Amino acid sequence: MNIIDYELWSFLLFFQNKKRRIYMFSASDVKELREKTGAGMMDCKKALEACEGNMDKAVDWLREKGIAKAAKKESRIAAEGLTEACSNENEAIIFEVNCETDFVTKNEKFHDLIRELRNALMFSDCKNMEEAKEVKLEDGKTVAERIVEETATIGEKISFRRFERITKSDDEEFGIYSHMGGKITSVVVLKGANRDVARDVAMQVCAMSPIAVNRDGVPADMVDHEKEVIKAEIKNDPKNASKSDEILDKMATGRLSKFFKENCLVEQDFIKDSSMTVEKYVKENNGEVLSMIRYSVGEGIEKKQENFAEEVAAQMNAA
């Protein structure tokens, strides 16, 4: 057992008695928080104690103390599988199929399933997930029935997780890009620009994972939350102790602008030429970004975690 494993195991259970309530969290929680934030083990322990074991609040607590930066949702990506997208004239589709292990994603049967679903869904008239499940395949079975059948054939649980159909007008263009063999896929719609420009923008979406096309698309509650965290972080910095609330508010607004630049597609630095933003690149090619969709395999799905304490105990018993 190495020193890091031993230290984590030694923190197996932490209790905090506060107002006659007991809060408990495990070594794996400390490990997860450390991986999400890059903060030290003791800081992560203190954060979980202060936040009564709530992981999301602990991330914010560390940020407010200036100990860690914002954790991206991408750090919670877990489930395996593939995403796929394609277009035909003025319609495009994007969907995701999940499996239990990355090994299955390399299985030809799984790739055959993806191709079969792509062809059936693209040339159907389904508009949403519920309709997509009932689309008939060449052998007469529905998509939902095929998924059940493939689960038995492949030997792992297969899940048809999500699906969207995107439409455009004749003067608009689709951009489609797939990264890491289908682990991340994006579809964008541009007005005025050509297909090559649209593909470049789709590549940007895959690589830089923007939240929205522009500031108007960022959820208001996310903006409010980010601003509150930034303000708390600024106030907790001793260097700002003598600054007025007005100055602190201006500082927070400035940092929020950085948040928008990092997370709004049109404000991001263009990955092929960082001297310009995505918006400038598209405008120079007589275009405008209208919409975007980005699928990353397993985002928002909690992957099965091994019990760290049991693993350590088993290693000790074996020794």
Image (spheres, rainbow, N blue to C red):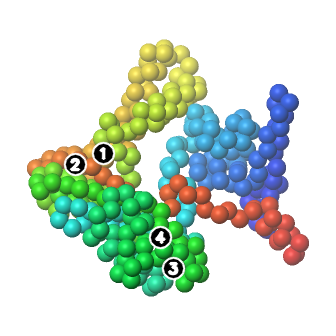
Check residue 144 in the rendering and tell me which mark sits there, or answer none.
Answer: 4
In the picture of the structure, the residue carrying the numbered disc 2 is: 289
Q: Label 3 to label 4, Cα distance in Å?
A: 10 Å
Task: Name the residue located 41 percent from the left edge and 37 percent from the top edge.
Answer: 219
Depth order, front residue of 87/222: 87
Inspect the image, locate mark 4, and give the three-letter code of the amino acid beneath it.
Ala
**Lower sequence index among marks 3 and 1:** 3
Task: Name the residue located 46 percent from the left edge and 80 percent from the top edge.
Answer: 110
Q: Label 2 to label 4, Cα distance in Å?
A: 34 Å
Q: Label 2 to label 3, Cα distance in Å?
A: 38 Å
Q: Label 1 to label 4, Cα distance in Å?
A: 33 Å
Q: Nearer the viewer, mark 2 or mark 3?
A: 3
Whether tag 1 and tag 2 are in contact, CB under 8 A, the answer is yes
Q: Nearer the viewer, mark 3 or mark 4?
A: 4
**Lower sequence index among marks 3 and 4:** 4
Q: Nearer the viewer, mark 3 or mark 1?
A: 3
Depth order, front residue of 48/136: 136
Res 255 visible:
no
79 sits left or right of 271 in the view: right
In the picture of the structure, the residue carrying the numbered disc 1 is: 213
